[in-house]
Image (cartoon, grey):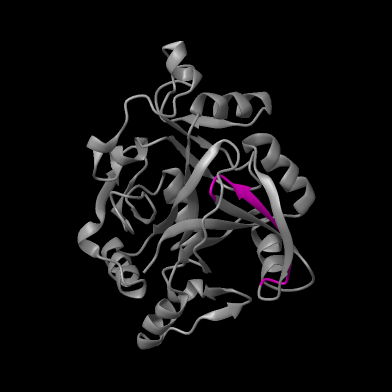
Amino acid sequence: MLDKVDRIQLTVADRKSAAANWQALFGAEVAREDDSAYLSAKRTIMSFGESEVELCQPDGAGRCADFLAERGEGLMTAGLSTSDMAGLVAHMAGLGVEPIWDGEQFYLNAADHFGMPFVISPSLMRPRVGLVNFLYEVTNTLISDWSGAAAHFAGLFNLDATRFSAIGSERFGYKGTLTLFNPPERLDRIEISQVTNDTSAMGRWAAKRGDSLYMCYCETHDIGAFLDSLDANRARWTPRGDTQEAEQHGLWVHPSATNGLLLGVSRTTFAWNWSGRPEIIHPTAGMGNREEMGA
């Protein structure tokens, strides 16, 4: 019943400054501004590829202000979309799950869903803006058993668990699954990652936050231009491969550059490498000048 990972919500201290940062780094553009009663926040909503990034600044006491006071700027909510809002709400009602409405969106309480705060929006087609194609992943990092979370989300969102793709990494210390919504047409999914190494970055996060929302991923159509922009803006990033100079496929942008968000990035189609369908990967799509460099 889900179509996409279509947005994230970030808590920021100053949404105008944050918007300028996202525009400089990624070519994101302001789509609109509004208020959220549920979050007690004023929002600047950025077009980020085909997706949206909601920059949420506290507007009095409430959820947004509490998040900022407790954690500082960072990733507050994972955003999913569906073309059948009424059907999804009816399905959840059958499970005893009550949505919390805020305008055309509704929220799900993190405490009931393995630490994952969700905002659900109607699916819309949008033009692609900036250096990014789209968001495709939000990450649920766990101390709890990953299989329980996978079963929970399959039931909650009426997903076909036979289409999920197993994952695991010794390098980053986790095991779990990708709850792919509609493979192989799209990459969109919740990554469910149970920590297996307490000393890894994810392990340290989970030790502090427990089951929680950790990070997100996007795809770029030009990783060369993407990296050039990061470097021009002195943004910290970590290559997927051995060195920054040789990177052609993917990276992680440090939270210090992105208002507290850990942002994973992969070039066009490359994420299928760890998403169960490596045959889909185009050998050079999205490399940009990194292909020309022979990096």
Residue at x 43%, y 17% (from the top left corner):
291
Residue 131 coordinates in the image, percent (x, y): 57, 35
278 lies above or below 54 = above
Chief secondary structure of the magenta span?
A: strand
Instruction: Give the residues in magenta.
Output: 39-50
Residue 249 coordinates in the image, percent (x, y): 41, 28
**Residue sticking out furthest to the top:** 293
145 lies above or below 105 = above
Q: Is residue 43 visible?
A: no
57 lies above or below 226 = below
Q: Quadrant of the C terminus?
A: top left
**Residue 44 on the magenta segment:** yes
Residue 81 coordinates in the image, percent (x, y): 47, 64
Residue 259 coordinates in the image, percent (x, y): 66, 47
Residue at x 25%, y 37% (from the top left corner):
278
Of residue 26 and residue 175, the one placed in the foreground of this image is 26
Q: Is residue 156 left or right of residue 244?
A: left
Of residue 9 and residue 84, the one placed in the foreground of this image is 84
Residue at x 41%, y 43% (from the top left corner):
200
Q: Quadrant of the N terminus?
A: bottom left
Residue at x 36%, y 49% (from the top left corner):
187
Of residue 6 and residue 265, the one placed in the foreground of this image is 6
46 lies above or below 254 = below
Q: Is residue 13 visible?
A: yes
Of residue 193 and residue 1, the one placed in the foreground of this image is 1
